[in-house]
Image (cartoon, rainbow, N blue to C red):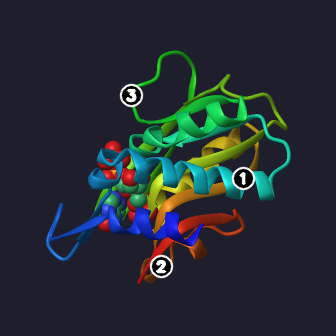
Amino acid sequence: REAKRRLVRERIREFPDFPSPGILFRDITPLLKDPLAFKAAIDLLEDYIKASHPKFDYIAGLDSRGFLFGPSLAQRFGVGFLLIRKKGKLPGPTESVSYTLEYGKAELEVQSDAVQPGQKVILIDDLLATGGTMRAACELMSKLKAEILDCLVVVELTFLNGAKILKPFPLHALLKYD
Ligand code: PRP
Ligand code: HPA
């Protein structure tokens, strides 16, 4: 397990001043490019969910990089995958929540019929920075009366205190950077 974690960490690189000055951007492109490292990340997320959540209904991915990890994970558990999208992408009735993130402001949406009240959902994204995006996703799913079991990310930037913003929603990160 530690070897897998190390492999994942080795495949995340840094770009200073992207997308704006002062931001040190963690880039997961090498992780996606290396099938062993990519599989290691999914394995670790699967292990964590197995140990923590015996039963749930859906995995919900955050637009856009949550879509890279969520579907593989959902397939491993035989559950469906839900889309939490940036504003204006989803047809039909939707709920929306606006939020701020490390380098901007945006709005997330989910289709109103995505879940039935009380269904259990695990959220996933690639990275937690300020926590604004994940927080908004939790609020969205709460509007639909889903039960949020957990918020998963591959990378948590701990110095931005996103986990605090997320509270009382739980967070699990494969890797922490400070
Ligand atoms: C990034 C990242 C997270 C979010 C984290 O996505 O993938 O979703 O920012 O930031 P926060 O914790 O400060 O809210 P981004 O909004 O850049 O969109 P993308 O996934 O479409 O590239
Ligand atoms: N990397 C990738 N996505 C991000 C980052 C980062 O450092 N900060 C906020 N979103």
The three-letter code of the residue at mark 1 reads: Ile
- Taking the image as shown, residue 149 lies to the left or right of residue 1, namely right
Q: Position of residue 99 (x, y in %)?
A: 45, 55
The three-letter code of the residue at mark 2 reads: Thr
Q: In the rendered view, would you say 91 is above or below 119?
A: above
What residue did someone put label 2 on?
158
Q: Position of residue 118 (x, y in %)?
A: 85, 38
Q: Earlier in the sequence, mark 1 or mark 2?
A: 1
Q: Report the Cα–Cα distance between label 3 and label 1.
A: 31 Å
* Ligand 2 found in image quarter: bottom left
Q: Position of residue 156 (x, y in %)?
A: 48, 69
Does the closest atom of ligand 1 sit within 8 Å of the Cβ of label 1?
A: no
Q: Quadrant of the N terminus?
A: bottom right
The three-letter code of the residue at mark 3 reads: Gly
Give the secondary structure at mark 2: helix
Q: Position of residue 145 (x, y in %)?
A: 77, 40
Q: Nearer the viewer, residue 131 or 98?
A: 131
Nearer mark to the viewer, of 3 and 2: 2
Q: Tell me, yes or no, if residue 21 can be seen here.
A: yes
Q: Earlier in the sequence, mark 3 or mark 2?
A: 3
* Neighbourhood count class around disc 1 (C-alpha, 10 Å): few under 14, some 14–19, many 20 upward: many
What residue did someone put label 1 on?
49
- Taking the image as shown, residue 58 lies to the left or right of residue 92, namely right
Residue 133 is tagged as: none
Does the closest atom of ligand 1 sit within 8 Å of the Cβ of label 3?
A: no
Nearer mark to the viewer, of 3 and 1: 1
Q: Residue at x 79, y 28 (%)?
A: 116
* Neighbourhood count class around disc 2 (C-alpha, 10 Å): few under 14, some 14–19, many 20 upward: some
